[in-house]
Amino acid sequence: MKRALCMAMMASMGFTTLSAQDALSLKLDSLIKRIEYLEQQKVGHPDTVLVVKEVPASAEEKFAVKGEKAHYDGDPSYSKYRIGGYGEMLYRHKDYSYNRWAGNGVYRMDRSEVSLPRFVLAGDYKFSRWFQLGVEVEFEAGGVGTEWEQETGSGAENGELESEWEKGGEVALEQFHITVPVVKEFNVKVGHVIVPVGLTNTHHEPVFFFGTSRPEGESMILPSTWHETGIEFFGNVGAGYGKFNYQLQMVTGLTVDGMDKYKYLGGAKQGLFEQDIFTSPAFVARMEYKGVPGLRVGGSFYWCNDAGKNSNYPHYYSDFKVPIRLFSGDVQYINRWVTARANVLHGNIGNTVRLTRATLGRTSVAYGGNTPVAKYAVSYGGELGVNVGNFFQTKKPLKIYPFARYEYYNTQEKLDEGWKGEVEDPRCQVSAWTFGVNWYALPYLVVKGDWTTHHVGTKDAFDWSTQYRSENDFSLGIAYVAWFNKK
């Protein structure tokens, strides 16, 4: 019946040549067979619907379609494994001496240096739909760092620390975790993870910031890159203009060991010994809004109830608490012409008077702790780059960004009111301007050059006449982020 109807349609349309009729007849036969097959499938499975596979909206979303069902399968950019990493090479010329903390600060001294700030190998592997491995190993400054050993058991001398100095730098396991992708709104990650506090830690790869070096403010106050061991819950919620992602973590907390006036919490990360102390864990929350194309707005909160309990010398801090609270906020906007970023960070440490005095009373210390630790530390700044490559007509788009960055940071913004006869050290207060150019020779390879001037003892962005000499750097660098192989 269907074939007769189709042939009648051909006759009515005036097909006269036999070859044309034969060709069209074959196509109609194929179409009819396809329709009959689909009808049989419909009868056998009345609830079956045709599912169209869509391109995921982002790298965090993936739906693997099988028949009429779909499930979340984690990162869609690879199906089984991927291997890659990132790295940086840096040349820097400085016009100042090594020690800011002597007298009126630095004196004039021309010196140059080359370094490999970091080389990172990264990999991901999907064992199955439910279990996925992620690993990052960082080689910092091309070396293996300093080995420390704590004597225990028979013959130990009050926990004496023995140090063996080898080539500078370190090898660090930055990430090592198992991810369980449940649905795009809720997933679980267990292991060694990045702590998402501050713009730099959250987005620390070198193609994601202007300048040859990471922004200084957050790196002077917090560990960078900051990674801890624990559990994380994360996901994406909402859609369209109401799209957010979130992270919730319980991880190893910071320790009072290593807190000082120079870097605040920068040296307070655990990891000196083979085991990290989990007596007082930290709780971390981050939320990012991504509902407007090109715009990302983020905020983070960190809380550790008592960093004294995480000390390798807990008996010195057993009769008081050392709580830590951190707040950070950041914003980024990117379009074809402009990239703009801004961030703010505020740190709060409790009982810093007793903390500092207890650290001074220790008979054997690992590092730091001989000057007042501030109650508050603060950092804020912003950077703006304009893609002048858009002015040039080339086969491939050019990405050349002249940029400017301003940062203010102070690791002794305010001492505890309990201090008598102590005042904030103005040399901890720095306003810094950076001017430079980033050229993206490839999408994930960037050549950088910049000049930075640090003005010590002021929070005024345009006050360049303080009692301390300025510290000026000229730098050149090259960096990349890439996946070398994936399946």
Image (cartoon, helix red, strand yellow):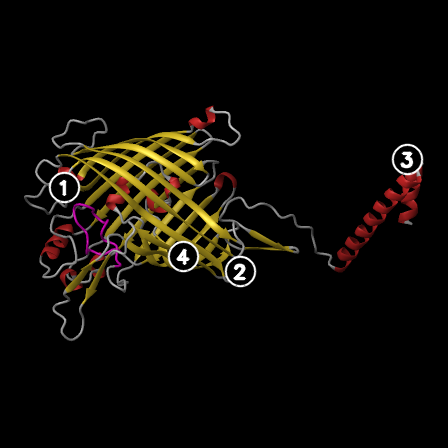
* Quarter location, residue 426: top left
- Give the magenta part as a residue range: 254-271
Mark with earlier residue (1, 3): 3
Q: Whole-percent x and y of residue 154? A: 15, 75
Placement of 238 over or under 315, stated as above or below: above
Name the residue beneath numbered marker 1. 99
Is there CB contact under 8 Å for labels 2 and 4?
no
Name the residue beneath numbered marker 3. 13
Q: Main secondary structure of the magenta part?
A: loop
Placement of 25 over or under 151, stated as above or below: above
Amino acid found under the numbered disc labelled 1: Asn
Q: Secondary structure at mark 4?
A: strand
Is there CB contact under 8 Å for labels 1 and 3?
no
Q: Say if residue 214 shows up in the picture.
A: no
State the CA–CA distance, disc 1 to disc 2: 54 Å
Residue 269 shown in magenta: yes
Q: Whole-percent x and y of residue 57? A: 53, 44
Amino acid found under the numbered disc labelled 2: Arg
Select label 2 or label 4 by which is in front.
Answer: 4
